Amino acid sequence: MQPYLQDLFAFLTASPSPWHAVAESAARLRRAGFAPLDEAQAWTLAPGGAYYVTRGQSSLIAFRLPAGPLTGWRMAAAHSDSPTYRVKYAGRGAEKGGYVRLSTEGYGGMNAASWLDRPLTVAGRVLLRTPDGIESRLVHPDRDLLTIPSLAVHLDRERNTGHKYDPHTDMQPLYSLAGGRSLPALLAEELGAAEEDIVDLDLDLCVRQTPVLLGPEEELIQAPRLDDLECAWATLSGFLAAPPLPGAGALWCLFDSEEVGSGTMQGACGSFLPDLLARAAAALGIGPDAQRAALAGSLALSVDNAHAAHPNFPEKSDPQGSVRLGGGVVLKYNASQRYTTTAVTGGLFQALCRRAGVPVQLFANRADLPGGSTLGHLLSAQVSVPMADIGLAQLAMHACVETAAAKDAEWMQQAMTAWYGTGIDRTADGAYAIRG
């Protein structure tokens, strides 16, 4: 297996929940020499320094300052969350008819049928009572723990002709037979803690399948959470690999809550990025006018996976704007600006990719089939900089296991290295010069 695939698979496996994805990203940043900052403490920043800060333990922003004056920021943003089912009532299951079920609630717009009859476990954080107060601990039992059993076709003869899944009836997971250990008791044992010290928890269901390669030439990837952790990995890899740019600060965002609208304190609609930019400017002694000028000289990418043309349903794609697995990085357009790409930002990104030898595919939805959106247009309302929306083509988006092309991940990694490592000067409103 290629080293980049080994690294991607390691990132996916280490990130079964948004909290784990941030912890894994923070560990990689620390190994690369980035220093952690705390939002609740005063910041002392140095020119040329590299830092990261988390919010809510499920969002993270990392940034590298230029050695000289700050003339702009080069940014990219992905998201840490994926559609799943979130455990309610602190994991206290309900016993009925000799079974114990957990109570769950849908998080985001998932493909419900894909979750049925699979071995599942949980992942997230547990809040523990300690002598000093409350402590948050990550948890992810490495075991086949749950399943969501489907109703046999003998008992629902219309199941294969169209079934509407009721999240309160169809999608509640079977945890155990009556009389077994409770989930809090099992998690306490996992953490080496007492069950009575569990105060609360944030837990997601997650599938047990690990990332695999498919196809005669192992040209395909199948894995959970490709949307959007594949892009999170590629953007972080490019961010860390690129050399520093004179005058430009490099900034990487991993936001939570994208799948539920981003309207949280740790989401793209929150104040996380504006707060960080303001604090960084203040710590460097940059005044308001210079700060606004630097923002005007900045560029950003919103990076989230895209719909590939489906082999069984090609009519669902616009014939001129359909993309394929293995065709390269996807540049997304939408007239209503649900994707932020304009002729300026799209042309600039394509020029960078041509220089880097990275193929680019252009995507737009059918005019009569509105697609989803991502965090870009929401983030641009908080921090107004020229932006483009890009991603990687995949199949089965929002299923619990998704499929993409192995080569595309490498191309995105190369594109992001070029994005962070190529000098771009704003020469006028809507005009840019590429250095080198």
Image (cartoon, helix red, strand yellow):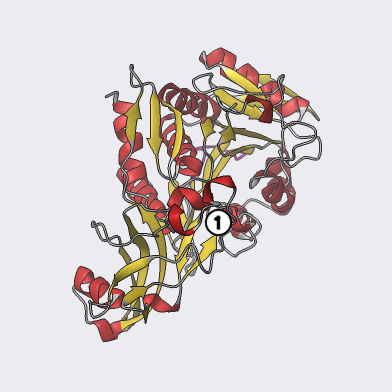
- Measured as percent of width and height from the top left, residue 431 is found at 77, 24
The verdict on residue 258 being magenta is no
Q: Nearer the viewer, residue 218 or 407?
A: 218
- Residue 177 lies in what quarter of the image? bottom left
Q: 361 left or right of 104?
A: right
| Residue sitting at x 79%, y 35% | 368
Q: Quadrant of the N terminus?
A: top left
Q: Is residue 333 visible?
A: yes
Provide the residue span drawn in magenta. Answer: 63-71
Q: Secondary structure at mark 1?
A: helix
* Badge 1 amino acid: Ala
| Residue sitting at x 60%, y 56% | 164
| Residue sitting at x 29%, y 26% | 3
Q: Is residue 130 visible?
A: no
- Residue 435 lies in what quarter of the image? top right
- Measured as percent of width and height from the top left, residue 249 is found at 55, 39
- Measured as percent of width and height from the top left, residue 136 is found at 35, 71
The image shows a total of numbered marks equal to: 1
- Residue 130 lies in what quarter of the image? bottom left
| Residue sitting at x 46%, y 59% | 155
Q: Which residue is mark 1?
A: 283
Q: 168 left or right of 426?
A: left
Q: Nearer the viewer, residue 335 or 112?
A: 112
Label 1, residues with CA under 10 Å away: few <14, some 14-19, many ≥20: some
- Measured as percent of width and height from the top left, residue 382 is found at 70, 53
The verdict on residue 70 being magenta is yes
Q: 358 left or right of 103?
A: right
Q: Quadrant of the C terminus?
A: top right
Query: Overall secondary structure of the magenta stretch?
Result: loop
